[in-house]
Amino acid sequence: MQPNAADTPMLPHGKEWLEAAKQGEVHAMEQLLAAHPALLGCRGKGCSLGFIGHSALHWAASKGNAHALRWLIEQGADLSLGNNADSTALHTASQNGQQSAVEILLAAGADVS
């Protein structure tokens, strides 16, 4: 089990990174990731609803931001990374009724279990 995001220090620029993923702002994400590569695995703290430990992939999937979701997958985002409830981005997309995000994640090899 991964550490709870509430117990994990937020990376510099983590809030901006997660908010950009929530909004589907790929250009901002490109700039942030180029300057701070560790952001790709950043989860939770510092973002609204940060207590649930969502990564950028979770946020893009839950909001149905297909362009951001594809971009994150191309960058190597971990499809199996869970939030604080051990839900993956695939679970989050499904729970939020984001069928296109579900299809993108399945095509990328996300595990359905």
Image (spheres, helix red, strand yellow):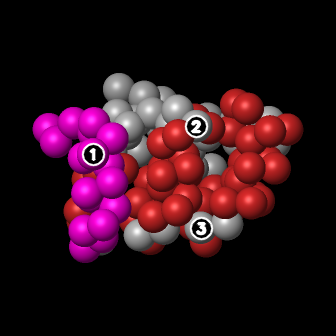
Task: Give me the residue at 52% from left, 32% from top.
Answer: 76
Crowd around label 2: few <14 · some 14–19 · many ≥20 (10 Å): few
Residue, disc 1: 107
Residue, disc 2: 75
Q: Taking 34 as reference, is 45 above or below it?
A: below
Q: How many marks?
A: 3
Residue, disc 3: 24
Asked if the residue under mark 2 is in contact with the one under mark 3, i.e. CB atoms within 8 Å, the reply is: no
Label 1 and label 2: CA atoms lie apart by 15 Å
Q: What type is the residue that disc 2 sits on?
A: Gln
Q: Quadrant of the C terminus?
A: top left
Is residue 91 at all visible to an observer of this figure?
A: yes
Task: Give me the residue at 48% from left, 42% from top.
Answer: 73
Position of 25 compared to 78: left or right?
right
Mark 1 or 3, nearer chain start:
3
Position of 77 compared to 1: left or right?
right
Residue 100 in magenta?
Answer: yes
**Residue closest to the far right:** 35
Task: Give me the residue at 67% from left, 66% from top.
Answer: 25
Q: Which residues are magenta?
A: 97-113
Q: Position of residue 6 (x, y in %)?
A: 56, 44
Disc 2, SS: loop
Q: Taking 88 as reference, is 17 above or below it?
A: below
Crowd around label 1: few <14 · some 14–19 · many ≥20 (10 Å): few
Disc 1, SS: helix
Label 3 and label 2: CA atoms lie apart by 15 Å
Q: Position of residue 53 (x, y in %)?
A: 49, 48
Q: 107 or 28, which lies in front? A: 107
Q: What type is the residue that disc 1 sits on?
A: Ala
State which quadrant residue 40 falls in.
top right
Mark 1 or 2, nearer chain start:
2
